[in-house]
Image (cartoon, grey):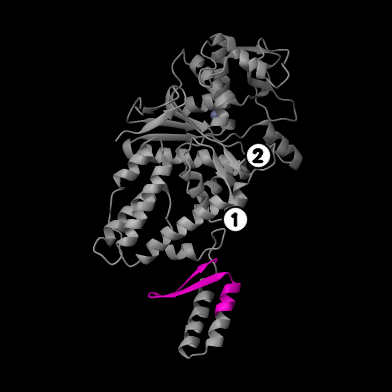
Amino acid sequence: MNLRLHNSLTRRVEDFVPQDPNRVTLYACGPTVYNYVHIGNARPAVVFALLARLLRRRYPGVVYARNITDVDDKINEAARQNGLPIQAITERYAAAYREDMARLGVDPPDVEPHVTTHIPQIVAMCERLIESGHAYAAENHVLFDVASYADYGHLSGRSVEDMIAGARVEVAPYKKNPADFVLWKPSGDDLPGWDSPWGRGRPGWHIECSAMSEAHLGETIDIHAGGVDLQFPHHENEIAQSTCAHGGKIFAHYWLHNGMLTLEGRKMSKSVGNTLVLHELLDLYPPEVLRFVLLKAHYRQPLDWSESALQQARATLDGWYGVLRDLAAVPAADAAVPAEFEAALFDDLNTPDAFATLAGLADAARRSAGSDQAATAKGRFAAAAGLIGLLQQDPEAWFKQTAGGAEVDAARVDTLIAERNAARAARDFARADAIRGELAAMNITIEDGAQGTRWRVGA
Ligand SMILES: [Zn+2]
């Protein structure tokens, strides 16, 4: 079974063929660390870490790089407002990002390059672009000469004329062409800056990914990924810089783009003011519920974030964890990931099909209870869930966590349940009902069944 991926360059789904099966390279654009990220920023991180995981099932050497943008005008502004050096801002929010990703079950990348530790590579790439006639220095800036690269606009399907017409910013007088973009810009004494042939300055945004990708993955990489909002201008500019800096060599063979998030049907953006901060959501819902919602829709489709989607995810996970809890006494057989489940993921990460298959595996495991098929059915279900990063908790712990994923005082709940059962045995039903009420006030629901009294957080 081949991995198939939708390639934005060709606008179709293609078989993935790496340039070197022993070293498969994947680069995804990472966060700009000036604040907590919003839930939309979590989607590419979750999706492309899953892609890296799938690649590792086929290829022995996968190098996945996801950068940290730690110099940027938004960072400068956050540092100024807080009266802090930029490192204080970037270190705080890079750490928060890693922590939030870990809570979402996102595997860390193999390489996490930071822009501020790649300034010499960025300056060198600017110099090469100037020498080869693809960039020019003007008024302490370095600009990419868009007219020097005939394929500019190929990825996004835009013409240079469209881009000039759509340019929202005022055209700077030092640009030869309004579509030319900044590779390097001057920094005043109050801003972070590095010495360069063009004076003290700092990099423009796009050049960083070209330089870091080259430094860690080589001149030509297999897959470049990011949100569809980065396709233009960011990825278009990366292609122009890298291709021209490398004498026309192709930059990335496959370009993957994830769709954007909407919130209850409306575009989610900072300018609209309806973004949801991931760090806060992680305290309101079990992180696994967020992961479920982020993966359930196909990554190329828009994803509508809503309270009902979260509730449905929670209900489905309750059902699946319930299957595992019912089979707690059955050891899971050491099973391979079912072929149908893997085939869905290898078909351009078709997670809607994969989730449907997972639901079928859950049903099969549920029906197998008490039969000699139970261990195999549980093993197959667990193997599939493991590949997609779900159902990794102890099922008992799942039902005993609060909304944000923290565990409640289980010893206290167990004591109250034991007291209630003792009261029932003594036919003191008033006392038993009173304890049930006390548990309900703690948001604990109890169920009496064949396996004794079970409890869970929530209604
Ligand atoms: Zn990038």
**Residue placed furthest toward the left:** 372
Quadrant containing the N terminus is top left
Secondary structure, mark 1, is helix
Residue in the picture at 56% in, 23% down = 122
Query: Quadrant location of residue 192?
Result: top right
217 left or right, relative to 101: left
For label 2, count other residues whose C-alpha is less than 10 Å away and answer few (under 14), some (14-19) or many (20+).
many
Mark 2 lies on residue: 34
User: x, y percentage for residue 128?
Assistant: 54, 14
* Disc 1 residue type (three-letter): Asp
Q: Can the viewer see residue 111?
A: yes
State the SS at label 2. Answer: loop
Q: Position of residue 83 (x, y in %)?
A: 75, 41
| Ligand 1 visible in quadrant | top right
Q: Is residue 144 visible?
A: no
Q: What residue is drawn where x is 39% and y is 43%?
A: 353
Q: Categorize mark 1 by other alpha carbons within 10 Å: few (<14), some (14-19), many (20+).
A: some
Q: Position of residue 226 (x, y in %)?
A: 52, 32
Q: What residue span does the magenta drawing correspond to?
A: 436-459
Mark 1 Cβ and ligand 1 under 8 Å apart? no
- Position above or below: 157 against 322: above
Is residue 447 found inside the magenta-colored segment of the image? yes
